[in-house]
Amino acid sequence: MADAMPLSPAAVVDSGLCIGCGGCAVTPARTMAWDSYGLRKPSGDLGEATTVFARTCPFSPAARDEDAIAAERFPAAPAVDARIGRFEAAYVGHVAVAEFRANGSSGGLVSWVAAELLRTGAIDGVAHVMPTDGADGVFFRYGISRSAEDIARGARSRYFPVDLAEVLREIRETPGRYAIVGVPCFVKAVNLLRAEDSVIAERVTHLLGLFCGHMKSATFVDSFAWQLGAPPKQVRAVEYRRKDAGRPANWYTAQLTLADGEVRARDWWNLADGDWGAGFFQASACNWCDDVVAETADVAFGDAWVEPYASDGRGTNVAIVRSPALRDLLAAAVADGRLALDGVDADFIANTQAAGLRQRREGLAYRLTWARRGLTPRKRVAPSANGLRWRRKLIYRARFAISAGSHRLARMARRCGAPKFYVAWARAALSVYQGLAYSRGWTGRLFDRLEGKRADGHDGG
């Protein structure tokens, strides 16, 4: 969109549309910093409006959408599905060699593909999220790995805010071919940057996408610490999904390692904010996203949240392959036994992400009908509340309120030194949400009576 109207980063931030990807902070005039909610935001000169920024911010109303980017990148894709985009092939399964599956949060495919691209010489480095020593309260950052051993350090799920600014600067300064691993909006941001920056276009040769429900703030780790009786400043490492082959893969366990080496853990369902779908600590921009499965990536990976795979504690991936070259790479590895993958169709993939797709399509269409300040998002779904019953609307309203409220209440609790204040609020909010969405507890019985439906029904997900 060469004729896009100029736009400033300040306008995106003030409209609640900045996801903190760092794509606008690769120049000396701007850096990335933490906001008061524990999310990444650009800092510095944010007021200048330019057409380049308007075209490259992934949440800009003037930027190309995922359909346009994917049509340009994968014009010959044999399959096109409105839910999961263009693709060459789709799979369910896991890595069958080495320790990739055991070390990953699911089936090990993300790390395997990254390592295989390095092994075959297709790339010289992989930009992905890696753990730090945690001493400054920042537990993960993007870095560039140039060996399979370094890639393994970045395995597992990382629900912590990060940005691409530093690795994009490093890629611009260091010749080579790079893959970048990222969530859908980050992958979109890189694609938009490649259209404007010839150096990024030449050097970023592969994009590996991660399915995404939403981005959490850094304060989510503080909440873990509060509920596990640990001082947040003593936390040095966090594991969001501790793996246990003897338990179902979707039984998440949070684990903290403290400065003295002590380890504390608790299952997510025993946490006040452990219901992912309720939206605790969700970044506001995630309310306005319509891409769950990284539709502009060469290949995208998620968890197989359907049976029998969800009960397999060893972990199982689903993968959507959009690049012909990566289709051939995976097919060859299946043929020689290195990957244990079965072909699946779009319906199978969509079923594994059914709740996320509802939130990003049906829920987004409803949210787009609300009055709002600032920029109006331009999405691939039209504003609509048609066909939504009052209870379903209330579920979407509750998620939105919990997302916003958790940021504010946790900030207040931290400033007042009263974490129990936030935890009590979170438990109350969760009780209302789960009653509304799943008919649980006395709130569920109340909503059921109001709706005149059976108490064992539910409208969740």
Image (tube, rainbow, N blue to C red):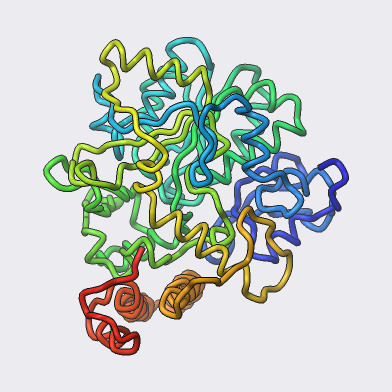
Residue 32 location, x and y as percent?
Answer: 64, 50
Coordinates of residue 305 in the picture (x, y in percent) = 30, 47
Farthest residue to the front: give it. Answer: 387
Residue 119 spot, x, y in % from top left: 42, 12
Residue 433 location, quadrant: bottom left
What residue lies at 63% left-to-right and 29% top-to-bottom? 73
Seen from the viewer's position, the closer of residues 41 and 415 is 41
The residue at 59%/62% (across/down) is: 35
Number of numbered tags placed on the structure image: 0
Residue 374 versus residue 70 in the image, above or below: below
Whether residue 101 is visible, yes or no, is yes
For residue 148, what is the image quadrant? top left
Q: Is 246 in front, or is 263? A: 246
- 162 relative to 153 in the view: left or right: right
**Residue at 56% of width from left, 72% of height from top?**
385
117 over 394 or under it: above or below: above
Residue 156 lies left or right of residue 284; in this view the side is left
On screen, residue 6 above or below 200:
below
Q: Please name whichever residue, 413 or 426, is drawn nearer the observer in this view of the structure.
A: 426
